[in-house]
Amino acid sequence: MPIVVNLDVMMAKRKMSLNELSEKVDLTLSNLSILKTGKAKAVRFSTLEAICKALNCQPGDILEYVEE
């Protein structure tokens, strides 16, 4: 898939665990894990906004387009 999710990279830069991010954005660990591993088929803007707010980043820091 040409969209790469760099959530794990941003979490590492911010020294934030999956559990901590899950609590801050009010998402279950399983849903956050699906997103983190790139297996998600869609992301709500409200979820993306909450993640960006919690990690103090931009959507482009999390989502990246890579040509196949």
Image (cartoon, helix red, strand yellow):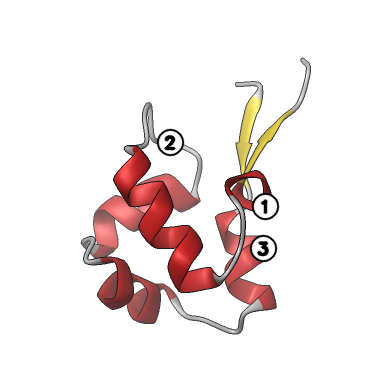
- On the image, the x and y values in percent for residue 48 come to 42, 48
- On the image, the x and y values in percent for residue 7 come to 56, 56
- On the image, the x and y values in percent for residue 40 come to 39, 35
- On the image, the x and y values in percent for residue 25 come to 30, 66
Secondary structure, mark 2, is loop
Q: Report which residue position mark 1 lands on.
A: 61
Direction from residue 38 to residue 20 in the image, left or right: left
- Residue found 78% across the figure and 17% down from its top: 67
Q: Report which residue position mark 3 lands on.
A: 9
Q: CA distance from mark 1 to mark 3?
A: 9 Å
Secondary structure, mark 3, is helix
Q: Report which residue position mark 2 lands on.
A: 39
Which is more N-terminal, label 3 or label 1? 3
Direction from residue 50 to residue 27 in the image, left or right: left
47 vs 13, nearest the viewer: 47
Q: CA distance from mark 2 to mark 3?
A: 16 Å
Q: Amino acid at mark 1?
A: Asp
Neighbour tally class for label 3: few under 14, some 14-19, many 20 plus, Cα within 10 Å:
few
Secondary structure, mark 1, is helix
